[in-house]
């Protein structure tokens, strides 16, 4: 468990587990997925869940359930990928509607940055963390600014990776340092 605090909101990040499938189903709504192509089929959702479970063992990153108290209220992740010829970490997040506007995404983001900074200390690890919210997703773009990301600019971004579906996104970059 990783604590994160921002504006007196405390959350915990817990690695993805079988019970998090229920959270994934709550996230899979037209409202929650409007900026990323809409809800997925049950088959696609189960495949996504299996990928999330396998991420840590593959050494490519980790998906976390975001907990407020004992309740799963969102998700956040980081994973390695190639972007414009460079190895980077990518992040993305969701907070369920009843919990939005309470600082939960910011607290989870701050906690995740700490996790990724640790991962970046490994030899050969990426040295930057990127987020690619839709240019139309103002809350996620505002969160990137709040967390200290630098706007590199708009870009065409394939999501989900390997799908062939391209969305217009902003490329937000956070340098992780090399302690």
Image: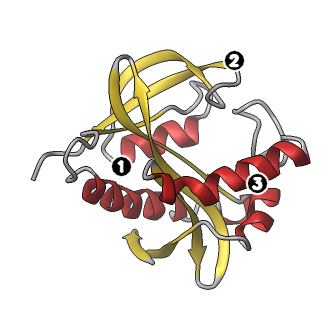
Q: How many marks?
A: 3
SS at mark 2 in the image:
loop
Say which element carries label 3. helix
User: Given the current orientation, which residue lies at the most extreme bottom position?
Assistant: 70
The residue depicted at 81 percent of the width and 52 percent of the height is 46
Q: CA distance from mark 2 to mark 1?
A: 30 Å
Disc 2 target residue: 164
Q: Nearer the viewer, residue 125 or 154?
A: 125
Residue picked out by circle 1: 147
| Residue 164: percent from left, percent from top | 69, 17
Where is residue 168? Give x, y as percent.
59, 18
Q: Residue at x 33, y 54 (%)?
A: 116
Q: Quadrant of residue 4?
A: bottom left
Left or right: where 18 falls relative to 128 = right
Residue 133: image quadrant is top right
- Where residue 57 appears, x then y in whole percent? 50, 59
Dot 2 and dot 1 residues touching (CB under 8 Å): no
Closer to us: 58 or 22: 58
Residue furthest left as drawn: 179
Question: Is the residue marked by circle 2 packed among few (<14), some (14-19), or many (20+) residues within 10 Å?
Answer: few
Bin the neighbour count of mark 3 within 10 Å (Cα to Cα): few under 14, some 14-19, many 20 and up: many
The percent position of residue 155, horizontal first and vertical second, equals: 49, 15
Q: CA distance from mark 3 to mark 2?
A: 22 Å
Q: Earlier in the sequence, mark 2 or mark 1?
A: 1
Question: Vertical placement of 23 versus 59: above or below?
Answer: below
Q: Secondary structure at mark 1?
A: loop
């Amino acid at each position: 468990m990783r604590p994160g605090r921002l504006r007196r909101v405390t959350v915990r990040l817990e690695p993805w587990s079988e019970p998090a499938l229920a959270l994934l189903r709550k996230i899979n709504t037209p409202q929650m997925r409007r900026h990323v192509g809409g809800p997925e089929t049950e088959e696609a959702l189960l495949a996504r869940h299996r990928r999330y479970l396998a991420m840590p063992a593959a050494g490519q990153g980790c998906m976390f359930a975001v907990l407020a108290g004992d309740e799963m209220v969102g998700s956040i992740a980081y994973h390695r990928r190639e972007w414009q010829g460079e190895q980077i970490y990518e992040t993305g997040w969701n907070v369920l509607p009843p919990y939005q506007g309470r600082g939960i995404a910011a607290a989870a983001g701050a906690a995740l940055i700490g996790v990724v900074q640790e991962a970046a200390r490994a030899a050969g690890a990426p040295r930057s963390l990127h987020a690619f919210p839709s240019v139309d997703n103002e809350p996620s773009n505002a969160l990137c600014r709040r967390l200290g990301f630098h706007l590199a600019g708009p870009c065409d971004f394939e999501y989900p990776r390997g799908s062939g579906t391209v969305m217009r996104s902003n490329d937000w970059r956070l340098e992780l340092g090399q302690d």
